[in-house]
Amino acid sequence: MGAVNRLYRRARFFVRRVTSFDRERVMQFARQSATLSKAPVWWVAADMAWCAVRYETTFENYSEWDFRILRGRERRTYMTDPKSFHLSRRLNDDSIRGVFDDKLQFAHRFGDELGRAWLDVTATDVAALAAFLEGRERVITKNPGGVGGNGITMRDVATVGDTAAFREELLRTGETLVEEVLEQHPEMARLYPGSVNSLRVVTYRDPDDVVHVLAAVLKVGNGGVIDNFSNGGMYTMLDADGRALHAASDEEGHPFETHPITGVAITGYQVPLYPEVLELVDRLARRVPEMPYIGWDVAITPERPVVIEGNHNTGVFQSKPSVSGIRRGLLPRYRAAMRF
Ligand SMILES: Nc1ncnc2c1ncn2[C@@H]1O[C@H](COP(=O)(O)OP(=O)(O)O)[C@@H](O)[C@H]1O
Ligand SMILES: [Mg+2]
């Protein structure tokens, strides 16, 4: 692709974002970043705009990875959400995105790797739902099209009452995928027992069928029953052996050297069954050849790692400089694997 072409594409993307942006939210990010240095907020806002064009950062990216305190040659090494978005558009075949966008299709396609029972309420009757609830204390109901933790509810079966009415409610609210609640490995529960703490492992299967792990992330819940950012969750990055490299941080950028609820030390925490995790994502990445660039949510049960879902337009996860001391992003790793 020509340089002019590329600049044009970036500028167009940037203008689209600027015209749809939320001024208050951007200023909030600018203020957050401004506290890292002595620069005035207007200067930070201008720097944010510059980075959006030069490095393709969103305002969130600029703030999340502390671009305010990075030098140009450090900034250059960061993968960003717009860059990742363009890569998934280019590498993944959009026509079958339903396999990942629809959790029901995903469950059919990846059945044996899910490690949990599930039921499609739209394709079954009241008796089947009653049989599914029978003998279970809790279930999770999900909107099959949901993202970012939206449309997911943990339910106590004891409070469900009339099954026919419950089924109607699920059909009305769209939470038509009912799942068995995963039991997590005791070592993962020790971190925070309130949610299933998952890994996000981003893989790329190259044209020679080599599967590259581009990023491995440990997500930990904090107060919520699910571990997503939007529910108070935090994340840290893992090394090649599944050991946490540094403290975790949440959506607001707060650092957590230890978990605020359980007190467990985050840095150096070893994810259990990690060799099996790598085997799992290697198998998963080969399963849908039309979609080579995927971010997998993985849970670790007492017996084995299982897949929660796959994301064909995965977000970007990198070490936060002010928390980790690491001032280098993952772009070189993506470049080497994807050869761009
Ligand atoms: N069957 C399950 N049992 C226990 N926890 C679950 C289950 N499914 C999802 N979760 C929790 O909810 C989070 C979000 O689920 P996910 O299916 O990835 O939805 P989303 O697309 O909104 O990210 C998971 O990371 C995990 O913490
Ligand atoms: Mg998820």
Image (spheres, helix red, strand yellow):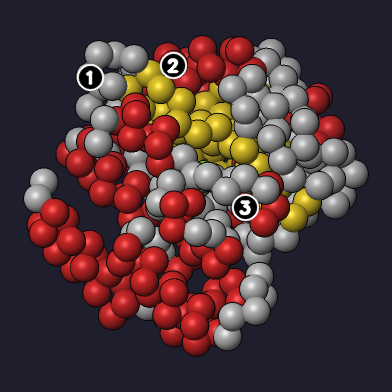
The C terminus lies in quadrant? top left
Mark 1 neighbour density, 10 Å: few (under 14) some (14–19) many (20 or more): few
Q: Along the polypeptide, which appears first: circle 1 or circle 2?
A: 1
User: Could you tell me which residue is drawn at 35 percent across and 58 percent down?
Assistant: 55
> Marks 1 and 2: CB-CB under 8 Å?
no
Q: Amino acid at mark 3?
A: Pro
Cα distance between the residues tagged 2 and 3: 29 Å
Query: Is residue 269 positioned above or below 21 on the image?
Result: above
Which residue has dot 2 on it?
282
Query: Is residue 99 positioned above or below 315 on the image?
Result: above
> Secondary structure beneath disc 2?
helix
Q: How many labels, in total?
A: 3
Query: Which label number is shown at residue 207?
Result: 1
> Marks 3 and 1: CB-CB under 8 Å?
no
Q: Nearer the viewer, residue 68 or 110?
A: 68
**Residue 73 in view of the camera:** yes
Check the image and name the residue furthest to the right: 263
Q: Along the polypeptide, which appears first: circle 2 or circle 3?
A: 2
